Amino acid sequence: MTQEFHISITPLGEDEYFVRTEKVPIGGLVAEEIVEWPIEQWLAQARHLFRDPLLDLLEGKSNAQVVIPSQVVARSGEVVSPSLVALGQEMYQELFKDTLRDSWSCAQGIAHNRGEVLQLRLGTKDRRISSLPWEVLHAGDRPLATGTDVMFSRYQPNTCLPKQTRTRTPEEPLKILMAIAAPSDKDSLQLEKEYEALQQELQINSGEIQIHLDILRQPGREQLTQRLEQGKYQVFHYAGHSNWGISGGEISLVSNITGLTESLSGRDLAGLLVNNGIQMAVFNSCRGAYNHLVNPTDDEVALNLAEALVKRGIPGVLAMAERIPDEVSLSLTRLFYRNLNQGYPIDLSLSRARQGLISAYGSHELYWALPVVYLHQEFDGCLIQK
């Protein structure tokens, strides 16, 4: 059992936001506050922490155009160097202020007394707020999204879940389709290793749950469509190249004629996945949840894969905020599915995977903060009902 604590953030004006609790545990305190946040300061720190310097060269920016702050002034007036902990602590303190702080403390107490996990979900449709790395929230020195007592995820308000035309019975296995695509005109990736690692993980650490994994190598649009229509899958896992764009981002597939890139927009992919009953989409690829360096005026325009699928109604979406090295990508895949295989919900599986990345690479590396997960408010995150 879990206790739910949902927060929505609505823009009112420049740097002014209306923050309110949308769902609290029974007996908890509802709260709402009008706040002013130093959004541009936070975004500047995030750019410094997350940005790959090579991207500046690829995008044709000179060193004079790239501004990296050597220090910033926190809301308390303290001058600090941009760091993950400092940013996470300030964002946490500014989010949980006054009545929100009291409501959050009350919810934590209720969950603790009942021996249950607290499900923290953050909802916003404002692009600047969505661009912030909320995954780095720090309660003191502790990264909130890496524990087992609090499960963190995002959601997008006012999205509808599509009606499922087919319900999986408890006796049926959870079916995963892993599509790996590396067109000849793109950088090579260790995609086959990712499949082998996941297959080995599911075999060696088999839990109470039966999981069936299928592989689809180098598909084009037609092959992917056909397999999804015939396979009756619940999870779609893509490994390959992806990017952001005004049509909901895109993934790179492979033309069966030329072997070159055949792009599929996030908007078109979302429709394909919804029509075939996909409950969870995983993008172990670069920039599937990337948007913090762009600022379009229309917040209804989806700029990345995560946004496109969430807007269309996919219950769960996991994607990367930035580029992720092959080695880390392999580790994340194994850790995430290892926990999912034990029957943990999506958000808790990811929390445990983040901690695994910290153990493997250290908390000073930002790899653990790159995965971004969206879960619909009406979806409990459980792909498998025991």
Image (spheres, rainbow, N blue to C red):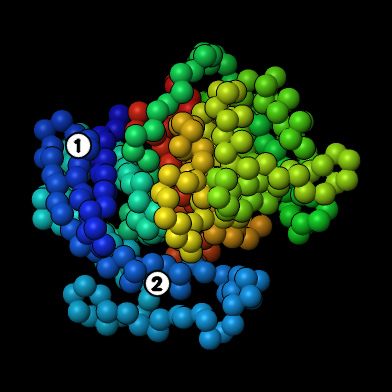
The image shows residue 208 at horizontal and vertical percentages of 52, 26
For residue 27, side relative to residue 370 (left or right): left
Q: Quadrant of the C terminus?
A: top left
Q: Position of 233 compared to 361: left or right? A: right
Residue located 11% across and 33% down the image: 27
**120 shown above or below 188:** above
Query: Crowdedness of circle 2 by 10 Å Cα count: few (<14), some, many (20+)?
Result: some
Residue drawn at the location 74% of the way across and 35% of the way down: 221
In what element is the residue under mark 1?
Answer: loop
Residue 368: horizontal and vertical position, in percent?
48, 57
Look at label 1 and name its amino acid: Val
- At horizontal 67% and vertical 36% (from top left) the residue drawn is 178
Q: Which residue is mark 2?
A: 44
**Residue 181 versus residue 377 in the image, above or below:** below
Residue 238 can be seen, yes or no:
yes
Disc 2, SS: helix
Whether residue 358 is visible: no
